[in-house]
Image: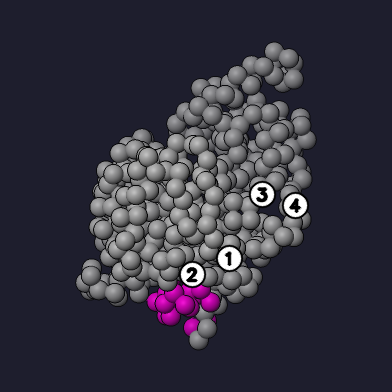
């Protein structure tokens, strides 16, 4: 660990968004590791004083005396409720992993990468056989989860683990005063395994802890576990917005104390401080999310529903997002040609014909596999180019061809697409310009 340099001149609360955000994420069953996760274990109490020190506006230029010198991979597990186990028992961490993420903090290119791994992913568990990845923690704890994932993902190295108990998510959302989420459809479902009745109306609303858990756990009949993964990423983004609220900062020491009992990790105290330091230099766009490529199993393949990994897609995602040699040996740029890329156009603007017009425009640009999907139920101000399957470099090609929009590195678009272009109000101006210049047929 080495001393780090000055943090620059940005406002303190913006500089600090990452590790506050990670505090939130680590204690949810839907998201990723926390840069201050060691606080939740019985570690050095001095950190609470350190936290107060770093939330002082007068001292925001000071930096933590640690840094990470190489990429680190951390597996994060949100654990299902274990029947008949007391909430304060260590056995609360021995259940199935309802949520599983691989998180990569990479100081070489200054990015935080999150890989969502569907709980139904088919894996080979030693002495058990083929099973779902969510069962590995039950059979052998975090060590077995790490071992199975390392082999499943192409012999990568996983360095640390974090496990979060079932009660964490509700408690944290309550501590934050709720979280604002757009619920895309009415959600009605009974989760018998967790004793949870899901009943949410559509539209924007501030969800309390129980409602946020309902949103995270809801499974529809069409997309099942994959739709749940998408909602987890949507919730992650909503939590990011919540923790940048200045009102959260003074409450962090109290929130930390409350959440201690919900987390189990083998991250050391020094490693946590190094991750905090890493986070101080991150911007929101430095966080990239992707889902493990694959497909649902067919009835002919298995009596149980599995997520079957796309081996080629897996290798591409792992090399692009999790290869620790990426800065030393630049990898081949992965991309897909306009003919191969599946581009879904989704209207979230006030122009009812925007999707058809933009689809026509892209086809004229040479993108032949463009199709229109159902409108997004809420109008958006800005267009998003959603990188559904992780092709970051190709997303730039799509955006440049489109001529507007922001790239969103998250798997929250139309399932089955390579990219989802969610058209906002800025698309209306673009369409008017194109029609005015005859670049787009009326």
In three-dimensional space, the C-alpha distance between marks 4 and 3, rounded to whole angstroms, equals: 9 Å
Q: Point out the tag, 3 or 2, that comes first from the N-terminus.
A: 2
Q: Earlier in the sequence, mark 1 or mark 2?
A: 2
Label 4: how many Cα within 10 Å (few below 14, some 14–19, many 20+): few
Q: In the rendered view, tell whether residue 438 sits above or below residue 263.
A: above
Residue identified by numbered label 4:
333
252 over 319 or under it: above or below: above
Q: Is 221 one of the magenta-colored residues?
A: no
Q: Which residue is mark 3?
A: 391
Residue 30 image point, x, y percent: 41, 55
How far apart are the alpha carbons under marks 2 and 4?
29 Å
3D distance between C-alphas at marks 1 and 2 = 25 Å
Is 124 or 407 nearer to us in this picture?
A: 407
In the rendered image, residue 311, in percent from the top left (x then y), is placed at 66, 65
Give the structural element (helix, strand or loop) at label 1: strand
Q: Is 371 situated above or below 331?
A: above
Image x and y of residue 441, in percent: 72, 19
In the image, the segment drawn in magenta is 128-147
225 on left or right of 261: right
Q: Nearer the viewer, mark 1 or mark 3?
A: 3
Asked if residue 134 is among those painted magenta in the image, a careful observer would answer yes
Please report whichever mark, 2 or 4, sits nearer to the chain's N-terminal start: 2
| Disc 3 + disc 2, Cβ < 8 Å | no
Q: Which residue is mark 2?
A: 160
Location of mark 1 (residue): 308
Most distant residue in the bottom direction: 127
């Amino acid at each position: 660990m080495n001393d780090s340099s000055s943090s620059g001149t940005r406002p303190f609360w913006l500089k600090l968004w990452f590790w506050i955000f990670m505090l939130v994420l680590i204690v949810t069953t839907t998201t990723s590791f926390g840069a201050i996760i060691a606080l939740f274990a019985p570690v050095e109490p001095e950190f609470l004083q350190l936290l107060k020190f770093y939330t002082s506006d007068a001292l925001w230029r000071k930096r933590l005396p640690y840094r990470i010198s190489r990429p680190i991979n951390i597996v994060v597990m949100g654990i299902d409720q274990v029947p008949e186990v007391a909430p304060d028992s260590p056995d609360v961490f021995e259940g199935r992993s309802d949520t599983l993420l691989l998180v990569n903090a990479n100081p070489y290119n200054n990015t935080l990468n999150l890989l969502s791994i569907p709980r139904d992913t088919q894996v080979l568990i030693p002495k058990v056989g083929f099973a779902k990845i969510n069962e590995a923690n039950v059979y052998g704890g975090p060590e077995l989860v790490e071992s199975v994932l390392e082999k499943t993902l192409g012999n990568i190295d996983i360095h640390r683990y974090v496990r979060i108990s079932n009660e964490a998510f509700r408690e944290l959302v309550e501590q934050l005063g709720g979280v604002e989420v757009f619920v895309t459809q009415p959600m009605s479902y009974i989760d018998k395994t967790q004793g949870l009745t899901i009943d949410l109306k559509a539209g924007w609303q501030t969800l309390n802890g129980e409602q946020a858990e309902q949103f995270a756990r809801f499974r529809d009949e069409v997309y099942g576990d994959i739709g749940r993964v998408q909602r987890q990423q949507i919730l992650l983004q909503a939590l990011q917005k919540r923790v940048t609220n200045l009102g959260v900062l003074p409450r962090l020491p109290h929130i930390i104390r409350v959440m201690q009992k919900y987390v189990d990790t083998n991250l050391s105290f020094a490693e946590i401080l190094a991750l905090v330091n890493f986070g101080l230099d991150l911007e929101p766009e430095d966080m990239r999310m992707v889902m493990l490529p694959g497909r649902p199993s067919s009835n002919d393949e298995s009596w149980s529903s599995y997520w079957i990994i796309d081996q080629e897609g897996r290798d591409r995602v792992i090399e692009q997002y999790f290869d620790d040699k990426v800065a030393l040996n630049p990898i081949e740029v992965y991309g897909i040609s306009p003919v191969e890329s599946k581009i879904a156009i989704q209207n979230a603007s006030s122009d009812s014909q925007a999707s058809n017009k933009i689809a026509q425009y892209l086809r004229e640009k040479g993108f032949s596999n463009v199709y229109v999907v159902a409108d997004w139920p809420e109008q958006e101000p800005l267009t998003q180019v959603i990188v559904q399957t992780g092709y970051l470099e190709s997303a730039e090609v799509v955006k440049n061809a489109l001529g507007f929009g922001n790239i969103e590195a998250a798997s929250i678009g139309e399932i089955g697409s390579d990219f989802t272009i969610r058209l906002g109000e800025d698309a209306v101006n673009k369409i008017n310009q194109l029609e005015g210049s005859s670049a787009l047929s009326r």
